[in-house]
Image: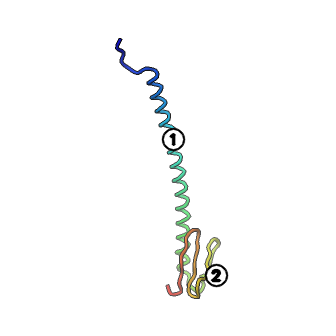
Amino acid sequence: MNRSGFTLVEVLIAGAIFVTTFACFGVLLKTSINYVKRVEAKTQVLYQARSEMERLSLIPFEYLASAAPTGTTITQVAVDLYLIKVGDLYTLRSKYQ
């Protein structure tokens, strides 16, 4: 007898493969969405820190040490040099810039 089509075992195996593949894509999608959210948050913090760095670059060198807002660390490295830390960004500011 010649029967065309799939047996029940073949259909069950194909269904299991489909469900497993679909579940893996779901996990990958969730992981990538979480990653994108973390990157967006870090990017926002980076832009805020860069903006603060730009604001500090406009302050004259003599007044820089007293103009440090909360979250900004200004350390005098030499007589004419400051190390400025805003968030995770560091920069050096010279009296001669």
Residue for point 56% across, 64% down? 45
Name the kind of residue labelled 2 in the image: Ser
Q: Position of residue 42 (x, y in %)?
A: 55, 61
Q: Which mark is residue 26?
A: 1
Q: Secondary structure at mark 1?
A: helix
Foreground residue, 13 or 64? 13
Tell which residue pokes out farthest to the left in this image.
Answer: 2
Foreground residue, 63 or 82? 82
Q: Residues within 10 Å of mark 2 (few under 14, many from 20)?
A: few
In which image quadrant can residue 11 be found?
top left
Which scheme is used to colour this image of the protein?
A: rainbow
Rendered position, 90 above or below 37: below
Name the kind of residue labelled 1 in the image: Gly
Residue for point 49% across, 30% down? 16
Distance of mark 2 from mark 1, alpha carbons?
A: 52 Å
In which image quadrant can residue 71 be found?
bottom right
Q: Secondary structure at mark 2?
A: helix
The N terminus: image quadrant: top left
Q: Position of residue 57 (x, y in %)?
A: 53, 79
Q: Which mark is residue 88?
A: none
Q: Position of residue 7 (x, y in %)?
A: 43, 20
Rendered position, 25 above or below 81: above
Rendered position, 1 above or below 90: above
Rendered position, 30 above or below 77: above
N-terminal-most mark, 2 or 1 = 1
Q: Residues within 10 Å of mark 1 (few under 14, many from 20)?
A: few
Residue carrying label 2:
66
Residue for point 48% across, 37% down? 22
